[in-house]
Image (cartoon, rainbow, N blue to C red):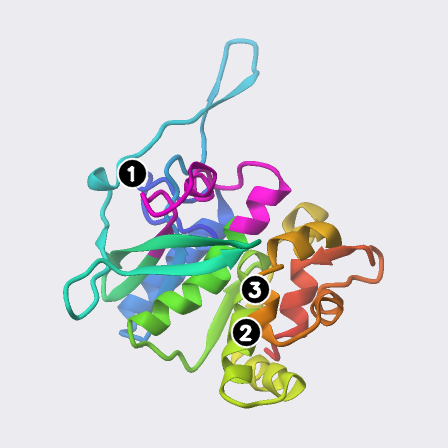
Amino acid sequence: FCAEYGFHESFPIYSGGLGILAGDYCKAASDENLNFIAVGLLYRQGYFVQSVDSDGAQHAHYADTDPRDLPVEPARLPNGDWLKVSLLIGEQEVWARVWRADVGRVAVYLLDTNCEDNAPGDRDITHRLYGGDRATRIRQEMVLGIGGVRALRALGLAPAVWHINEGHAAFLILERVREEVANGLPTDVALEAVAAQCAFTTHTPVAAGHDSFPHDLVRQQFSGYLDSLGWPADRVLALGRAPDAPHEFNMTWLALAGTRH
């Protein structure tokens, strides 16, 4: 699971090193014929193209893409229907349609909220890579982590290992815990069971590489989801509490709490 993938400059769903590395994971897995799949987001704008003027100033240029011009196709259910998944963000049900890109032998599933099922504000969740305010970012990361797990389940896939490539995707831990609690495990046992299957890689050892969100924002965006998780909000917030910023929910700390590799 990763927020960006760099496969080719014609497919602008990456910004830099993290995306290039994630793309290389997929290409290497294909070369080795590994049983490997990838999950990300399909952004309508992706990241900007940079130009530098005669004074040396950088300018960012954004352009919308049309999925029909990209190397993707709808992910289909066995009955032929386009796969869509939903999750609660706040009290609102948000839908994401799922696209598939084939990178050699590896299937990459990309979620996109720009569909008619959603209100205009929710359609813009996957508008721009690393764009918008913190509310947009947490919503993007909920779609990636929670919606991504649900997409794999709808496809009948049951990974033995879940790799979180940077903290952006760490909400998959909460969705996996929710699944295990629904199967009858106590919450603390469920967390350990999930952590044993999860691996985390972080590449950016500076503050900008570690998303964090105010507790009030987390409570607001997860208000509907927490009912299905079976944990009180304070218990969830504790998973992302960094010692140097106890009033923020830190995605890297969530990833460290919910992985054992």
Looking at the image, tell me whether mark 2 or mark 3 is earlier in sequence order.
2
Asked whether, in this view, residue 188 is left or right of residue 175, the answer is right
Q: How far apart are marks 2 and 3 (CA)?
A: 24 Å
Camera-side residue of 157 and 201:
157
Give the spatial CA distance, label 2 vs label 1: 30 Å
State whether residue 165 is above or below residue 60.
below
Q: Position of residue 152 (x, y in %)?
A: 35, 70
Crowdedness near tag 3: few (<14), some (14–19) or many (≥20) residues, C-alpha within 10 Å: some
Q: Nearer the viewer, residue 54 or 243?
A: 243
Residue 196 horizontal/vertical position (percent): 57, 84
- Give the residue pinned by disc 1: 10
Residue 30 point in image, percent of width and height: 28, 67
Q: Is residue 210 visible?
A: no
The numbered mark, 3 or 1, whose residue comes first in the sequence reads: 1
SS of the residue at dot 3?
helix
Asked whether 95 falls inside the magenta stretch, the response is no
Foreground: disc 2 or disc 3: 3
Q: Name the residue under label 3.
A: 225
Residue under label 2, please give it. Answer: 199
Q: Which amino acid does label 3 sit on?
A: Tyr
Task: From this view, report whether residue 12 is shown above or below residue 100.
Answer: above
**Left or right: 133, with 74 as reference point:** right
Which residue is found at the position 44% from the left and 39% from the top?
124
Residue 170 drawn above or below residue 160:
above
At 66% across and 75% down in the image, what residue appears? 231
Whether the residues at callouts 2 and 3 have beta carbons within 8 Å, the answer is no
Q: Residue at x 52, y 66 (%)?
A: 164
Q: Report if residue 160 is visible in the image.
A: yes
Q: Which mark is residue 247?
A: none
Q: Nearer the viewer, residue 133 or 183?
A: 183
- The magenta region covers 110-139
